[in-house]
Image (cartoon, helix red, strand yellow):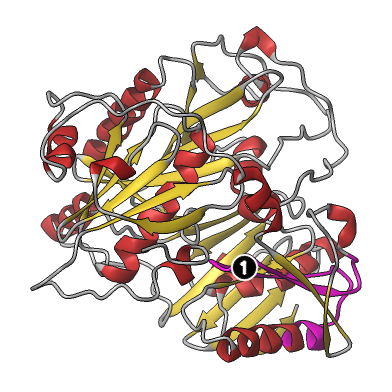
Amino acid sequence: MPQPGGVASGFNHVEVNEQDYKTRLYVCHGKHVVHVKEVPFARSSLNHDDIFILDTKSKIFQFSGSNSSIQERAKALEVVQYIKDTFHEGKCEIASVEDGRMMSDAEAGEFWGFFGGFAPLPRRAPAEGNEKQEETAFKLLCFDQGKLEPVNCKSLAHELLETNKCYFLDYGAELYVWMGRITSLQERKGASEAAEKLLSDSSRTRTPMIKVIEGFETVAFKSKFKEWPQTPGLKMSSEDGRGQVAALLKRQGLNVKGLMKAAPAKEEPQSYIDCTGNLQVWRVNDKDKVPLSSSDQSKFYTGDCYIFQYTYPGDDKEECLVGTWFGKKSIEDDKVIAVSLASKMVESAKFQAVQARFYEGKEPIQFFVIFQSLQVFKGGISSGYKRFIAEIGIDDESYSEDGLALFRIQGSGPENMQTIQVEPVASSLNSSYCYILHDGNTVFTWAGNLTTALDQELMERLLDVIKFTWILHKCAL
């Protein structure tokens, strides 16, 4: 039976009972915003054009139709992660099945076993109306001077957002609260309270509310718009035919697989990367990779290794970058596994993707632009790291939201911000940086006397990233 709405509303009536778990089949489609509905659990529901999610008691399968795009598959993976976190408490396995893969593949065989065995799917014309649904399945509301008014528009354009107002972008599955750059703190608090009331009044308490500040828009938020203006910067050519990101990384002197190492650029403006692409991130754990939710994909631990895939529109096709990030205190086994898994991803993409390696503390500016707001925490959460510190008798200093933590703020603008956790001691402070210190629900900000107004603005805006519920105390050197 179809469920109306997106991710959240589509799953409101799923009952989780591990003793009597009902297997369900969902269909997903949409490149910019994913539309999900439950379909009959039968082979006849499957086709080559859409993405299907089979939710079983112990494993969630993502079946990708042969005609589906990379963007659609990435968006569907967010739904898979949502189901895992919400209805399985994050404790079930995830499997990916490609359309056309035969029974020789173990996961494909297990998937088709639920349908009585493998059989070819009939070809049919692509479903019509998907693009129209994507254009109309949203509501844009303007919050100004305590009042909420609908914005009459058929499609989303950047020009609709005024810098002195707050806006709600409601997609059913998620509610974005966009706050203009020159809105006051009081106006932003009022917008947040109004958004919470909107969700409560419509019985959507499980729908996530995502706060976005002008200039700090996430990739997911920008992807909802038809176009997003580019930040002025140096135009790039597609060197060696491998795409803009590869060219940018090459010019920064990074050793990109398949490219010669170039000399570092000298005194030139920072290059621009189109941030309207799609980002997927995995953490290496034992011999596998664990997908991170969209809210956690910019949160790294110095004791772990990560793999990410960034797809973005090129001149005439989608370009893809597969990167590995190695924390300073990550163990050797995790590093080896990260490289191996990333190489397999490139191989599965028929070597059309660019592969690059990044080391904590030595990342080029383009790396930070892709992630936009990167947080690096102390410690690690991978099984290998936990075993390592236990074996050598080191205390686990991994970050905890309820503990004491000091963060150094870095970055030259909203497109490349970083919060780096450092030792919470006086010697960690530097007059050229701003810092955020939190202890439980109490948060302090500290601005060095050599910091600029931009540094301090970044610090203020990153407060929501570090802590959502806080009592603010400001300190200045």
Query: For numbered disc 1, what is the local secondary structure?
Result: loop
Q: What residue lies at 64% left-to-right and 19% top-to-bottom?
A: 243
Q: Is 238 located above or below residue 120 in the figure?
A: above
Q: What residue lies at 90% left-to-right and 66% top-to-bottom?
A: 162
Q: Is residue 439 left or right of residue 190?
A: left
Q: Is 257 or 343 nearer to us in this picture?
A: 343
**Residue span colored magenta:** 162-189
Q: Is residue 407 left or right of residue 104?
A: right
Q: Amino acid at mark 1?
A: Leu
Q: Position of residue 31 (x, y in %)?
A: 58, 43
Q: What residue lies at 66% left-to-right and 64% top-to-bottom?
A: 430
One can see residue 450 in this view: yes
Q: Residues within 10 Å of mark 1 (few under 14, many from 20)?
A: some
Q: Is 18 or 365 nearer to us in this picture?
A: 18
Q: Is 380 located above or below residue 10 in the figure?
A: above
Quarter holding the C terminus is: bottom right
Q: Is 442 located above or below residue 358 in the figure?
A: below
Decide whether residue 15 is among the magenta residues: no
Q: What residue lies at 53% left-to-right and 43% top-to-bottom?
A: 279
Quarter holding the N terminus is: bottom left
Q: Position of residue 300 (x, y in %)?
A: 44, 54
One can see residue 360 in this view: no
Q: Mark 1 sits on what residue?
A: 429
Q: Is 240 located above or below residue 27 in the figure?
A: above
| The residue positioned farthest toward the left in the image shown | 19
Q: Position of residue 302 (x, y in %)?
A: 40, 52
Q: How many marks?
A: 1
Decide whether residue 182 is among the magenta residues: yes
Q: Position of residue 450 (x, y in %)?
A: 81, 63
Q: Is residue 45 left or right of residue 92?
A: right
